[in-house]
Amino acid sequence: MTIKTTQLNQLKEEVSKCKGCLLCETRNNIVFSDGCENAPIMFIGEAPGKNEDEQGLPFVGRAGKLLRKYLEEVGYLKEDFYIANTLKCRPPQNRKPTKEEKLACEKFLLKQIEIVNPKIIVLVGATALESFIKTKITITKARGEIFEINKKLFVPVFHPSYLLRFHNEKENSPRYLFRKDLEKILLLARENES
Ligand code: URA
């Protein structure tokens, strides 16, 4: 086992015992991560939903399946990405995470980023965007932009649950822009390889 795997296992164990906010009382499972821990790209979503809470894995519900479909179509390989969320436990009724919940969970996400050490962090949706980009900017304005903070590249993209409201991919539609952003991110990772 690599040092990275050991560190992530320890962190996951710590998260599974967390009672830092009330979500510990309603969760079925913590949702820690999925994907390759040596990946150059880390996706950060908002919080687990019903399916994620049941399975203990991020992005496995309707929105998650859409995200994964796009990743595959654009050409992402299994070793290209790692997935996590700002919160590790499900907020009831899938409501937005509160400030207190985000604060309680932040240390785990920051540690996770430190261990995985990706080159690019993809901020999936407004909640992840607000957690890292402190200037007031909407996801519509920020998506597809590259923000460099402490030598790491952050790229916001639309949340796939927003994309579920649209069905076509005509030029400049949300789905069209989402695909373009995923292509740009993969290219960026390939350029930064080695
Ligand atoms: N939405 C998210 O932001 N994260 C998940 O894991 C699932 C849905």
Image (tube, rainbow, N blue to C red):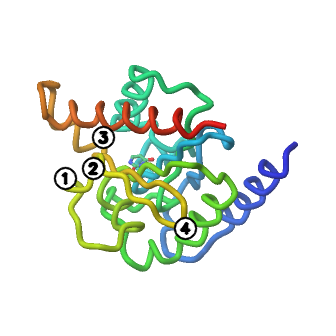
Q: Kindly indicate whether the residue at mark 2 contacts the one at mark 4 (C-beta within 8 angstroms).
A: no
Q: Quadrant of residue 154?
A: bottom left
Write the residue at 40% across / 53% down: 123
The answer to which of marks 3 and 1 sits earlier in the sequence is 1
Q: In the rendering, which numbered label is found on residue 160?
A: 3
Q: Residues within 10 Å of mark 3 (few under 14, many from 20)?
A: many
Q: Please identify the quadrant where the N terminus is shown.
A: top right
CB of mark 3 near ligand 1 (< 8 Å): yes
Mark 2 or mark 4, which is nearer the start of the sequence? 4
Q: Is mark 4 within 8 Å of ligand 1?
A: no
- How far apart are labels 1 and 4 at the CA level? 32 Å
Q: Amino acid at mark 4?
A: Cys
Distance from disc 1 to disc 2, alpha carbons, whole Å, reads: 6 Å
Picture coordinates of residue 86, whole percent (x, y): 47, 61
Vertical comparison of 176 with 85: above or below: above
Q: As drawn, is 165 to the left or to the right of 82?
A: left
In the structure shown, which secondary structural element does the residue marked by tag 4 occupy?
helix
Q: Of the residues tagged 3 and 4, which is closer to the observer?
A: 3
**Residue 51, image x and y in percent?**
44, 41
Viewer-proximal residue among 150 and 102? 150
Q: Which residue is mark 1?
A: 140
Mark 2, residues whose alpha carbon is within 10 Å: few (<14), some, or many (≥20)?
Answer: many
Question: How far separated are the C-alphas under marks 3 and 1?
Answer: 13 Å
Name which residue type carries label 1.
Answer: Thr
Query: What is the C-alpha distance between the residues marked 3 and 4?
Result: 26 Å
